Image (cartoon, helix red, strand yellow):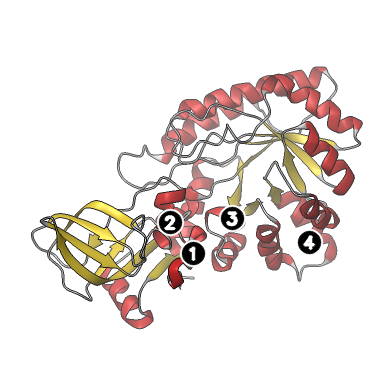
Amino acid sequence: MDQKKLVQLAKKHGTPIVVVDHKVLRQNYKQFRKHLPRVQVYYAVKANPDPAIVRTFYEAGASFDVASLAEFLNVHEMIKDLPAHERQDFIWDRIIYANPIKAVETLEQLDPYKPLVTFDNYEEVIKIARHAPHSGLALRLSVPNTGSMVELSSKFGASPGEAVDLMAFAHDNKLEVEGLSFHVGSQCTNPGNYSQALHLAASVFAEARTRGFNLKLLDIGGGFPAHYDDAIPPFRRLAKTITAELNRLFPEPIEILAEPGRFLVATAATAVAQIIGKAVREGKLCYYINDGVYHTYSGQIFDHCQYRMRSFKKGPTQICSVFGPTCDALDTITLAAQLPDLDMGDLLYSENIGAYAAASSTSFNGFPPAKVVHVNQ
């Protein structure tokens, strides 16, 4: 985003702020659709559940991946005024509850909506049959997560060897398994993860057919890498690999879903904070700002992501430390920022901070989260 515009917004709204550019959201959505035209886009709401962002994707034609009742109701706000049959069609066709483990209370509240939900074990089948019998099911497979920034396979996913037995168990409990899902790990820059996962899913599809189960859909999950820097391979290259394998292994009319989150929102937001303190410690310049790892920069803790600190002012730079406002030493944004000599009240900013950042911000130590400012809606 234009630096002049960021400074103007900071003066108008105060700091800290997170500026979300909805033009970039729409561009990212269009890019995904362009390079994976066969894939239905289910925005992963957990990446950034801001209702304004959800609405922009809804208006762009997206579907939604939700993983909690709150996220489901966030999306439901977009469709609550539709006629009953259109609302139900949207829930069935364009929402997936992609958390394989769900509390009994959650299932009971979801059941009237007749959602599509994921599962990966026998106990979950029993719970769903008892408490949400009107749900459709997608079985989540465990697949390689090699090289992904956030590994997920140790927590979720059935082994391919037990997959069809789980489908049969669901069928015996009067539930219908619509298809398979998998997740290669967040911020996946290894195309081999997708290739291996698609081959594993194809083998399960084949075994399922031999045992009388005709699967209709494949959810290839998320993991599509955001372009944090030029070290990230172009998305079109990954999309080309995925498209070739999809067309070879899963010909139409099999429906293909994906759950991009980070890819759609990461590059659409910029954080702006103010320097509230300045010190030299052991010969090193240290800045203290009014945002930190308990707030917008929480992605550094929970998402294993690093955000580059930038200055609006120019000049010779030196290696600096940048700390957040709280009393906890964990509130360290970076010990190696290249920044010029700045004054109290000057502004710093970080780009590409739209995913898993504001979403996990807290009010720790009495400091409220940054204000979110939306532009180009």
Q: Earlier in the sequence, mark 1 or mark 2?
A: 2
Q: Residues within 10 Å of mark 2 (few under 14, many from 20)?
A: many
Instruction: For the residues labelled 4 and 1, say whether their Cβ atoms are less than 8 Å apart.
Output: no
Which x, y percent locates residue 134?
87, 48
Q: Is 55 in front, or is 10?
A: 10
Q: Which residue is mark 1?
A: 362
Packing grade of label 1 (10 A; few <14, some 14-19, many >=20) is some
How far apart are the two marked residues, 4 and 1, measured between alpha carbons?
A: 33 Å
Nearer the N terminus, badge 2 or badge 3? 3
Spatial CA distance of label 1 from label 3 is 18 Å
Q: Tell me the residue that label 3 is attached to.
A: 45
Alpha-carbon distance for marks 2 and 4? 35 Å
What whole-number distance in Å separates the C-alpha atoms at marks 1 and 2?
8 Å
Residue neighbourhood size for the residue with mark 3, other residues' Cα within 10 Å, grouped as few (<14), some (14–19), many (≥20): many
Spatial CA span between label 2 and label 3: 17 Å
Q: Which amino acid type corresponds to the residue marked 1 in the rendered image? A: Thr
Q: Nearer the viewer, residue 244 or 300?
A: 300
- Which amino acid, by three-letter code, is at mark 2? Ser
Pointer 4 with pointer 3, Cβ within 8 A? no
Q: Secondary structure at mark 1?
A: loop
Image quarter of residue 37? top right
Q: With respect to residue 257, does 9 lie above or below? A: below
Of callouts 4 and 1, the N-terminal one: 4
Residue carrying label 2: 298
Q: Mark 1 and 2 residues: CB-CB less than 8 Å, in contact?
A: yes
Q: Earlier in the sequence, mark 2 or mark 4?
A: 4
Q: Quadrant of residue 180?
A: top right
Task: Identify the amino acid type marked 3.
Answer: Val
Q: Secondary structure at mark 4?
A: helix
Judging by the rendered image, the residue that carries numbered circle 4 is 87
